[in-house]
Image: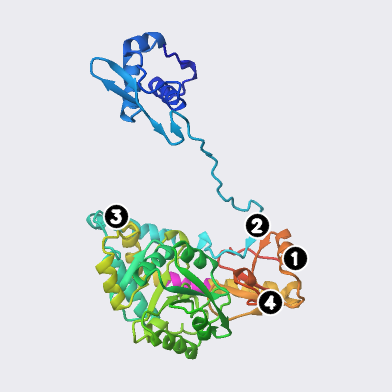
Amino acid sequence: MLTYDLRQADGPLYTYLYQCIKSDIIAGKLQPGEKLPSKRTFANNQGVSTITIQNAYDQLVSEGYVETQPKRGYFVADVDVVAGKGKRADINYEIHIPQEDEEEILYDLSKNEINPENFPFSIWAKVSRAVISEQKEALMKKAPTGGVRELREAIASHLYSFRGMMVDPNQIVIGAGTEYLYGIIIQLLGLEKIYSIENPGYRKLEKIYRQKGVKCKFASMDEKGILVSELERVKTDVAHICPNHHFPTGITMPASRRYEILAWANEKQGRYIIEDDYDSEFRMSGKPLPPLFSIDGCEKVIYMNTFSKSLTPTIRISYMVLPVHLANRFYETMSFYACTVSNFEQYTLARFIKEGYFEKHINRMRLYYKRQRRNIIKTIEDSWLGKVSTIIENDSGLHFLLKLENKKANEEFQAYLKKHKIKVNALSDYQWGQGVADEYVYIVNYSPLGTGAMSFR
């Protein structure tokens, strides 16, 4: 007779009995075809109601561990467990999740993040309430593949007024982060193509492309940006570049090099340029240079941008502008995909842009970051660090470079700063191969910093 110690039950009795019988079946203690006690007999033996036994048996039947035979009762089913019939699989249930550095860091200059103090929470909440109140029906409808029309129209209007780009809203595809959109691009252009990224460059790009199963090469740069000769050397089909503010060097590609890159793309059919314009809103002086997309006359440029820098990375809304022929291909071959951004976030952002809040936020943040940049540069110049370093400025983006003149090794300098609870990355951390990036140059990301004073003393 089956007997279990109900004093060990942690929760409903029927759940505990169900788990005990299931464990015995998997362990082979109860063999396939073996008859289980009747509900009444089992209930009397355990001192519980027949309803408790009925519920336990019903759960076992629903999961296939027990079978019922008319007028005969309940029998153990022939369960084929992963490790073999009637044997428990030898499974390692330990999951290795990388842990964040628990060491206290007061100033993390290594992260491309936004200080929470700068998000317009009150305005966003106001717009969100309006969307919920006035667009209930739209919120419940399935969004088109490329994103809701209102947001695509708002983005098209913003691109025209801010970047001088004339695009049809139907050319815009919205997605939850640029990583998702890269996957869409690969499907549109083909797995057989060779994708090249700048060296030094954003290391995550290589991981994404390799994970997607495509060939990823590295093309070196000079003081004007990526070299066409390097694209030719590695037999590039698709060049992924940041011409307006390269990460991490901060280089802004001049017009002459831009036309060289476009000429390279036009030389052969099937060549494309992915233009990543990730922080173009934050050029600190003068107007931003026109994007490649706006001077491309042969539909070779795919323009990409995100609201991660201008609003917050956690909003997870990015977009790309496709050339007309690729937009048509997207809707012809991939219209079955669902948009990966919720309607609620899309309608909220659309209204945020259309009602002028986004432009006001960008203007406010540009002034804020200009002050932040000036303050941290002054802090460096007034400290001992200013005597042994040179600041490499380009008046654009949310980071600048710091070059040491005393040739202090990267590890030594980073360890010294860490003792003072400051974390920073070296330019060489973003290079592939040797001798590409200067070993004594460091990247200072100042966007996560608060308004408090910082000290290098």
Residue topped by disc 4: 403
Cα separation, mark 2 vs mark 1, equals 17 Å
Which comes before the other along the chain, label 2 or label 1? 2
Amino acid type, label 1: Glu
Amino acid type, label 2: Ile
Q: Secondary structure at mark 1?
A: helix
The magenta stretch spans which residues?
Answer: 360-368
Can you tell which mark lies on residue 105? 2
Amino acid type, label 4: Lys
Q: Is residue 4 above or below residue 96?
A: above
Q: Is residue 270 above or below residue 319?
A: below
Question: Is label 4 in contact with label 3 (beta carbons under 8 Å)?
Answer: no
Q: Is residue 357 visible?
A: no
Which comes before the other along the chain, label 4 or label 1? 4
Q: Secondary structure at mark 4?
A: strand
Can you tell which mark lies on residue 132? 3
Q: How is the image coloured?
A: rainbow
The local crowd at label 3, few if under 14, some if 14 to 19, many if 20 or more residues have their Cα within 10 Å, is some
Residue topped by disc 1: 412
Cα separation, mark 2 vs mark 3, equals 40 Å
